[in-house]
Amino acid sequence: MDKKKGFVRKTKQRDLILKTLRSADTHPTADWIYEQVKKEMPNISLGTVYRNLGKLRDLGEITELSFGSKYSRFDGNPENHYHFVCTECEKVMDIKGCPVDKELDRQVELNNDVEVAFHTSLFYGLCKDCKNKKEQD
Amino acid sequence: MDKKKGFVRKTKQRDLILKTLRSADTHPTADWIYEQVKKEMPNISLGTVYRNLGKLRDLGEITELSFGSKYSRFDGNPENHYHFVCTECEKVMDIKGCPVDKELDRQVELNNDVEVAFHTSLFYGLCKDCKNKKEQD
DNA sequence: ATAAATGCAAAACTTTTGCACCCGA
DNA sequence: TCGGGTGCAAAAGTTTTGCATTTAT
């Protein structure tokens, strides 16, 4: 018997959830993902979406971002990187051209007597669209 | 008549809440503040704590930090600075000796076609106490 | 006197969970 | 077949809100 306990089974639901998240250009909420996925799989439940997002996070396939608003947001890219939060439309997206500075972690350790595993930075402001919209006034 | 509409009234509750927050060495949750304040003012309600924290935030007296866990945390210091989150005991505190690098904001603007108002960084790891506790094993 | 603030409780909202059934390996 | 996954609905947990009353100015 080579069946092992505690294995992760592949399901249509989880595949679709991951595909949907990976193809999003921003970092959506569980509810947004639920709405998208429902178009293709109308009977899926929100509980399943939450359970699968949690499982994918535990497997290291995605990252859960919990900041900015009441909702958690999910990032299909598990690599550490910086994020931008639009204060106007609430969208959350990746920062380009600004690599994570690991030297900072060492500096913080020395100055604060802590052990740093990693850090992340959040930039707040107006995204491209909201910036342009404001300029039109 | 020099009474104006929309003014902010001074109350014992708000004073106590602000005093409690300012004297905390970490960044507590609304519920923690509620528990502290109740010792001195047993009839205060959690709703009042939330309302006052919101008002103080709107007035720019404090900062609301919404990351790391389900709860919002509040920071008696409205100045922008970096934070440390202990992944073991969940405490959130200020980072010392690591000033906010405003140059980064300009770099992000250039690379991402956005308008950055400010940024904040979160360092995750073990705080002094949890680090020492681990070393004892 | 007037409107802001409070206390209480109910409501709103996001996320989790129990359970019976289903389905992938 | 076996145990992980799903759907549904109820529950949990944080934050907000309606309302009558109190209180600061």
Image (cartoon, coloured by chain):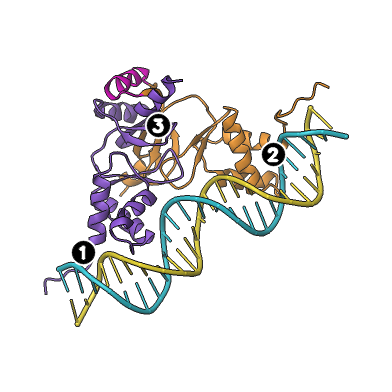
Chain colours: A orange, B purple, C yellow, D cyan
Q: How crowded is mark 1: few (under 14 residues within 10 Å), some or many (20 or more)?
A: few
Of the residues shown, which amino acid type is indicated by label 1?
Arg
Q: Which residue lies furthest to the left in this view?
A: B1
Measured as percent of width and height from the top left, residue D3 is found at 76, 34
Rendered view: B137 above or below B1: above
Is A37 positioned to the left or the right of A71 in the image?
Answer: right
Q: Alpha carbon of mark 1 to alpha carbon of mark 3: how far? A: 37 Å
The answer to whether the residues at label 1 and label 3 have Cβ atoms under 8 Å apart is: no
User: Is residue B42 visible in this depiction of the protein?
Assistant: yes
According to the picture, the residue beneath numbered tag 3 turns out to be B86
Secondary structure, magenta segment, majority class: helix
What's drawn in magenta, residue-wise?
Answer: A101-114
Q: Is mark 2 on a helix, strand or loop?
A: helix
Q: Alpha carbon of mark 3 to alpha carbon of mark 2: how far? A: 34 Å
Chain under callout 2: A
Disc 1 versus disc 3: nearer the observer: 3
Disc 2 versus disc 1: nearer the observer: 1
According to the picture, the residue beneath numbered tag 1 turns out to be B9
Measured as percent of width and height from the top left, residue A107 is found at 30, 19
Chain under callout 1: B
Please identify the quadrant where the N terminus of chain A is shown: top right
Viewer-side residue, A115 vs A81: A115
Measured as percent of width and height from the top left, residue B48 is found at 34, 61
Disc 3 versus disc 2: nearer the observer: 3
The mark found on residue B114 in the picture is none
Rendered view: A96 above or below A64: above
According to the picture, the residue beneath numbered tag 2 turns out to be A13
Q: Alpha carbon of mark 2 to alpha carbon of mark 1: how far? A: 53 Å
Of the residues shown, which amino acid type is indicated by label 3?
Cys
